[in-house]
Amino acid sequence: MSREGIRDKVSIVGAGCCQFGENWDQSPSDMIVDAAYEAYADAGIDRPQEQIDAVFTGSLYSNKGPHECSDALKLFHKPVTMVSNYCATGTDAVRCGVLSIAAGMYDTVLVVGYDKPKDRGVSGPSVMLDGVRDLPKTPAGWFALCASTYFKKFGAGREDLARIAVKNHHNGTLAPKSFLKREITVEDVLKARMISWPFGLYDCAAQTDGAAAVVLTRTDLARNFRDDPVLVKAVTVQAGPNPQKDPGNDFLSWKPTVWAAEDAYRQAGISDPRSQIGIAQVHDCFSLTELLSYEDLGFCEKGSAKEHIASGDFELGGELPVNTDGGLKTFGHPTGATGVRMVYENTLQLQGRAEQRQVKNPKLALSHNIGGHPTACGIAILGTA
Amino acid sequence: MTTGICSYGAYVPPSRLALAAIAGRAASEDGPERAVAWNDEDSVTMGVAAAISCLAGFDRDSVDAVLFASTTYPFREKQGASLIARALDLRRDLRTQDHGGSLRAGTAALRSAADAVSAGSARSVLVIASDCRTAAPGSSLESAFGDGAAAFLVGDRDPIAQFEDWSSISDEIVDVWRAETDRFVHSWEDRFVVQEGYTPRLLEAVQALLEKTGSSIEDFDRLALYAPDRRSHATVARKLRARAEQLIDPLFGRLGNAGTAFAPLLLASALEQARPAERVLVSNYGDGADATALRITEHAEKLPPRRGVSWHLARRRPVASYDRYLKARSLNPTEWEAGSDPGLSATIHFRERDEDLSLRGQRCRGCSAIQFPPQRVCETCFSKDDFEPVRLSDRVGRVVTHTLDFFFPTPDPPTIVTVTEVDGARIHLQLVNCDPKTMRNGIPVEFVFRRIHQSGGRPNYYWKGSPLPEPPAGNET
């Protein structure tokens, strides 16, 4: 492991995000253009073909490769790369952009994450069928496998999960670009139809289309773009074994998150995440995923999440607000877009531009994705200059 | 040399559809019903289940040939016996044959097996008869049919029942049939079928057997007689002057006419009940008739108890509604007809056949850890390409964690999904035969062969878990 990391070498100078939702009238290209041009404007870029040196895109569903993005933005005669890493795809695209600048290859890079699941004709995720074994391949069924074990060991239950959904629905009402903008109650969550026990409908993220983009540049050049650049403190992805066949899995936490947090905190020089991190965007594909992440990210002790949920620690006015924009719950989860959308939200929060949902004066902001069975985790930590 | 039946097994699907439900009436608790193969069952999976029970306690490597009899094997071209042999993880230098075309295929396969053993070309032949016939929804045939399978190990080593003799009559009659492109079985007027087909031919075959063996019907202790329905069974019994106590219960109103497997299931039922020195007569019908006489030997008492017809009939799960049955058998109209997609890659099927069909995992020679599926690099000690195959299908697993998936499409949600550990290997596994309300982690499960999906319009087979029955459950091993 190299002693020299990427901390503070790269800055975010522009961030953009299209309206997330059931974007029936928009193609992937339309959304890419919305997100990228907002990021350009944010960075004061008016000649992207000259000012962007390289592009990193992330998408899980696209079968068109990086050309879809370069064609939409007419960014040719430069390196364009597509990244795929399950739900960590967006974070991994950011990571590749950061590494390319830190390595001295490029000065300014555009990162675009997007996906368009609503073109597939199903209201939930499609049931994948790419082999004979491992059925049913439903994400809810995969992420639910920690519930029976965790509930038994730590005495948590569906009510604790419901409070997470209620919190995120509330935060979503304050985010202009979220899809769901409706307050819900714990009772609504508990009464909703069951998807995969213990997840009822409201324990699951929405399904939407979306795209998000950020402009990265060398920190020493950042103030040429904006006066308030945001520093990249850490960015990592970690691979884990498939928990369905991993002989050592205890089904009380997800290993990739634990490992990615360890690496990200080392890179950022964080010793006490609970007190040092000001806000976090955490992967809430399902309510339990967010609960486990509180613990796996070191925000609280293993098994204690329900007490912190009850005392409101992770609410917008709490000690460590989580999913300040409503998370995947209200934005939905266009897979490649999600990690970049989280970086967009953290950038706005660190710059004090998050309007009604603005958290007071955060210094460090974490974003987190976990996906696959789950088998991959991405974490990015940003900080104020 | 003595050729006979060395072991037997049976399978009747636990799902039972009330005949009242077919007729649109409310079902009473003890009213007549039929066994129905559920959406993940077919003639192959039922045949495998019967064969596993038949082979319990026998060395699978001793099997020299597999004969599979069915009129409802899912492929017209592509063999069933070889698929079943792979699911059973049998030897590769094996003779495999399918028998079909007639409900007599089961007894015909038994006779071929007996001939092969008597002729010395095989010492141990696994005969499987299995059928899952579909009749038009609401038809009288739908009420008459039932699904099931029986398996026999025919050999010359300590048979529990010795074949005495056989008779066969061939006939040409269009009475019950299913043409090349038909989905449902058709029947001509039932009075014609019984008066000109079933009754005279069955009696003719039985009479021929009695003459060949120099016996009268009185000399037999058990009569296992195929019949298309309860009434014609009674007619034949009366014409043979059979006493009620000689008759093996034909199980109308419980199992239903199980087609190719029906006479074999009645034979399995007879073997379950018979004592040494008793004589059993089996007769079957379909484009003619077969009859065979068997004598129970002293080895019958040494065969450990196994899952026979009575065990399976006792394990019963009433189907909630006729609509559920239609969904399970894909008989209801659907919004999306099966697409023209080519299904899973045949090359992937080919590469994965040991793990998917035989449930073969591997044991690492470096650290002894057992894992599934086979992989090049050890999950535990990272040693490379140093493994030996391990059959997991005959082991007992334990549920580590589970969820109830209501999203996955199935006729009766939720699907119980588990991570199940078997001797250290962990497998993502669906459970069957389990009430979601009482489902809990830690329960022991056995493996059952099932049709996992129909991608590409073809059955794709894999294993599921089934909670281990509480011991001692009836006459089960």
Image: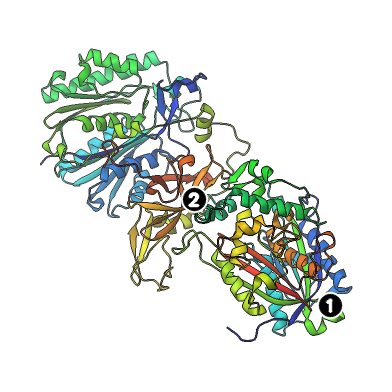
Q: Is residue B370 above or below residue A209?
A: below
Q: Is residue A69 above or below residue A172?
A: below
User: In the rendering, which numbered label is found on residue A51?
Assistant: 1
Q: Say what amino acid the circle numbered 1 marks.
A: Gln
Who is closer to the viewer here, B139 or A292? A292
Is B321 displayed left or right of A50 in the figure? left
| Image coordinates for residue A375, horizontal then vertical, percent | 56, 64
Q: Is residue A147 above or below residue B245?
A: below
Report which quarter residue A54 is drawn in: bottom right
Count every numbered label the image shows and give the total.
2
Q: Which quarter shows the C terminus of chain B?
A: top left
Who is closer to the viewer here, A136 or B200? A136
Who is closer to the viewer here, A149 or A53? A149
Dot 1 falls on a residue whose secondary structure is helix
Q: Residue at x 65, y 77 (%)?
A: A270
Nearest to the eye among marks 1 and 2: give it: 2
Disc 1 crowd rating (10 Å Cα; few below 14, some 14-19, many 20+) is some
Q: Is residue A139 above or below residue B167?
A: below
Same subunit under labels 1 and 2?
A: no
Is B412 displayed left or right of B399 in the figure? right
User: In the rendering, which numbered label is found on residue B402?
Assistant: 2
Dot 2 falls on a residue whose secondary structure is strand
Q: Chain of mark 1?
A: A
Q: Residue at x 66, y 69 (%)?
A: A274
Q: Say what amino acid the circle numbered 2 marks.
A: His
Q: Residue at x 40, y 39 (%)?
A: B73
